[in-house]
């Protein structure tokens, strides 16, 4: 076990990396290098850092459209990840996953499906297979509050509980499904959904990485020990819009007082206060160096060759017919 | 020599493949008892770790299978009713079939979706009797529609061994077909390769699934007046265009008989491709279900909406004029 001080500084390092990565990515969106725009996870770093810190390297993660933090916390290479966001051939998915659907098998992130709520059954299936291996590996499914109104999520809860699979369901409740407030979209409670299937569930502060880590560790250990699935609902907030299109669209669905109240609970200073200033300065400098190199790598990477547009569609290498007969 | 039915061939393919590769698992509803008969005996033989009888959660267990596939399993998912494949169309076409490209080739999703009951079920109502395979062709999902016993066995084996998602449509009307064969002759049939069941020189009839047997009967019936070549694509995606081109090079004429609906159905695509890329000496014809056909409430009405031998005869005669 690492010392408490090391755990604190490691969490800080991960969170700082995510925050600064997202800020650099926002610059690249503004510069037109990331054409898709992004779903920034700024404000939610403590959940990504804390949950992923509870995992072993051989565990698996199923992410979603707001997944940058999850991949970075699992150890994805920031340069190849930024290149992916910028649609470059050097990206972790060769520019085919982009910001919305990044996966990185090297760090155990197997998918980031955009069909809200449907990733949970992917994770349950993978976790079932891991459970059969008997090596204690677990899978984590991360989704937002928008997922809890999908029937598919409940199907995943049912199968996972029925077959007692080693999966941890992580709900990042940032209070809005795009623009829809959770209170106007969700009847009952989020944890109550899991409890109905006999799945232990709790609501946890998602703005403190160490609180997140403690809760995630308990759920992960339960899964490893054969105790089956858990649901953790983390209360968190995204400081930016749902997607960078909101920079132009200027949608008004959150009042300024609410945003300010959550910004006052920014998870960064919470974690920063637990790290010695000299170490913090060193970590910050290291991260700037890593991200300078990452941005340089991403923008210098070659754009894909349009001739390769049909590549990788099929694992067997099948080439689809072209759209025009030759 | 033993006589084997199409349905038993599916069962045998599942058993042989599960015996060969322990990563193959089976999921579906009522599969322990083998409600459809495709999975009969497999639970007793392979047990809980390999045969997962599911609750009624099609979207859930379809994605569950994808998740298991991403970590090395090769799931076969059974569906009892054709339109259930539309309920899980998103999970197959938008998730399983896109994970290879969206991961830049990191992901493999070797899942087989087995529908051992495609098409018309007499008077079972409007929701049990569809043929939605053109939807999968449109989405670029590998799809097979075997017509014969040996092809049912061989294509199911190949679907299971393929590293991409593959949908297997087994037409109800073909399930009872029997073949006298040597079990040793049962072997994988490659995806994407068609089969000429009967050689001819005047017209190529492309027939899909159970309609291959109707086409062969019609070819025999017309043998004195026209030489009909019967081409069975076997795999509807990827389609054996080269095989079809070879056949049309011999005959110069084309009729397609397809149990799917007319607009944006498979027959339309075959005609369009032949018109664009192959040398036809006469305008081609197709025999299909009507646009947006709803069948399954009354046998008289249902039969009226499905392609018939009489319609095929008329179409062949029309292209021969």
Image (tube, rainbow, N blue to C red):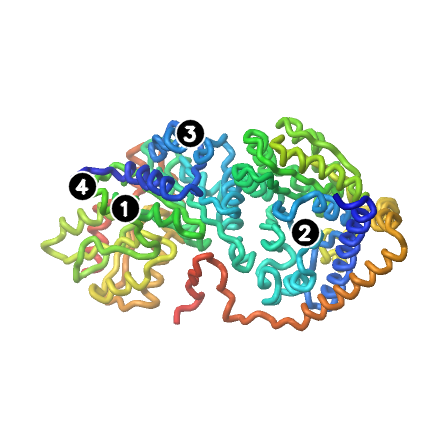
Which quadrant, please, contains the N terminus of chain B? top left
Q: What element carries label 4?
A: strand
Q: Which of B189 and A8 is in front in this view?
A: A8
Which of the 4 image quarters holds residue A201? Answer: top right
Do dots 3 and 1 share one subunit? yes
Q: Position of residue B81 (x, y in %)?
A: 41, 36
Viewer-nearest of discs 1 and 4: 4
Q: Identify the chain of the residue marked 1, using the numbered disc in the image.
A: B
Q: Identify the chain of the residue marked 2, using the numbered disc in the image.
A: A
Residue receiving disc 2: A74
Viewer-nearest of discs 1 and 2: 2
- Is residue B5 shown to the viewer in this render? yes
Q: Residues within 10 Å of mark 3 (few under 14, many from 20)?
A: some
Viewer-nearest of discs 4 and 2: 2
Residue receiving disc 3: B30
Residue receiving disc 4: B180
Mark 3–mark 4 contact, CB under 8 Å? Answer: no
Mark 1–mark 4 contact, CB under 8 Å? Answer: no
Q: Position of residue B158 (x, y in %)?
A: 35, 50
Q: How crowded is mark 2: few (under 14 residues within 10 Å), some or many (20 or more)?
A: many
- How far separated are the C-alphas under marks 3 and 1? 25 Å
Mark 4–mark 2 contact, CB under 8 Å? Answer: no
């Amino acid at each position: 076990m690492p010392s408490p001080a090391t755990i604190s500084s490691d969490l800080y390092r991960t969170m700082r990396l995510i925050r600064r990565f997202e800020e650099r990515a926002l610059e690249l969106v503004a510069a037109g290098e990331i054409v898709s725009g992004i779903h920034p996870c700024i404000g939610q770093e403590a959940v990504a850092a804390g949950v992923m810190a509870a995992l072993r390297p051989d565990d698996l993660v199923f992410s979603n459209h707001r997944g940058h933090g999850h991949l970075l916390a699992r150890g994805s290479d920031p340069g190849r990840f930024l290149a992916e966001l910028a649609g470059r051939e050097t990206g972790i998915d060769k520019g085919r996953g982009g910001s919305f659907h990044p996966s990185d098998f090297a760090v155990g992130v197997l998918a980031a499906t955009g069909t809200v709520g449907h990733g949970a059954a992917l994770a349950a299936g993978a976790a079932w297979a891991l459970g059969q291996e008997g090596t204690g590996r677990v899978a984590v499914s991360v989704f937002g509050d928008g997922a809890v109104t999908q029937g598919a999520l409940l199907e995943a809860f049912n199968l996972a509980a029925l077959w007692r699979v080693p999966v941890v369901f992580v709900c990042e409740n940032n209070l809005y499904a795009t623009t829809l407030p959770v209170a106007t979209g969700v009847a009952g409670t989020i944890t109550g959904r899991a409890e109905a299937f006999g799945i232990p569930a709790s609501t946890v502060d998602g703005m403190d990485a160490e609180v997140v880590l403690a809760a995630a560790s308990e759920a992960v250990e339960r899964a490893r020990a054969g105790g089956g699935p858990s649901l953790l609902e983390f209360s968190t907030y995204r400081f930016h819009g749902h997607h960078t299109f909101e920079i132009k669209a200027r949608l008004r669905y959150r009042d300024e007082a609410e945003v300010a109240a959550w910004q006052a609970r920014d998870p960064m200073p919470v974690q920063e206060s637990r790290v010695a200033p000299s170490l913090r300065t060193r970590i910050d400098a290291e991260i700037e160096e890593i991200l300078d190199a990452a941005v340089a790598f991403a923008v210098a990477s070659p754009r894909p060759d349009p001739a390769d547009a049909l590549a990788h569609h099929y694992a067997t290498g099948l080439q689809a017919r072209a759209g025009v007969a030759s | 020599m033993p006589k084997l039915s199409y349905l038993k061939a599916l069962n045998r393919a599942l058993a042989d493949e599960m015996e060969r590769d322990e990563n193959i698992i089976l999921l579906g509803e009522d599969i322990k008892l083998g409600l459809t008969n495709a999975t009969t005996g497999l639970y007793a033989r392979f047990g809980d770790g390999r045969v997962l009888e599911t609750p009624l959660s099609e979207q859930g267990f379809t994605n569950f299978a994808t998740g298991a596939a991403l970590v090395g399993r090769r799931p076969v998912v059974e569906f009892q009713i054709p339109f259930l494949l539309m309920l899980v169309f998103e999970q197959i076409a938008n998730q399983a079939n896109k994970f290879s490209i969206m991961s830049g080739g990191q992901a493999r999703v070797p899942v087989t979706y087995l529908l051992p009951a495609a098409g018309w079920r007499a008077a079972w109502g409007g929701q049990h009797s569809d043929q939605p395979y053109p939807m999968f062709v449109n989405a670029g999902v590998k799809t097979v529609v075997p017509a014969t016993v040996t092809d049912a066995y061989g294509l199911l084996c190949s679907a299971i061994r393929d590293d991409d998602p593959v949908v297997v449509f087994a037409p109800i009307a073909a399930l009872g077909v029997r073949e006298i064969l040597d079990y040793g002759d049962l072997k994988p049939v490659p995806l994407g390769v068609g089969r000429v069941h009967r050689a001819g020189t005047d017209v190529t009839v492309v027939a899909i699934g159970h309609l291959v047997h109707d086409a062969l009967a019609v070819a025999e019936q017309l043998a004195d007046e026209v030489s009909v070549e019967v081409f069975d694509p076997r795999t509807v995606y990827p389609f054996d265009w080269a095989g079809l081109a070879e056949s049309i090079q011999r005959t110069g004429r084309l009729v397609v008989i397809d149990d799917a609906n007319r607009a944006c159905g498979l027959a339309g695509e075959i005609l369009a491709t032949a018109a664009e890329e192959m040398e036809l000496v006469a305008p081609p014809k197709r025999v299909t279900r009507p646009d947006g056909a709803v069948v399954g409430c009354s046998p008289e009405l249902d039969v009226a909406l499905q392609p018939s031998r009489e319609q095929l005869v008329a179409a062949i005669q029309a292209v021969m004029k």
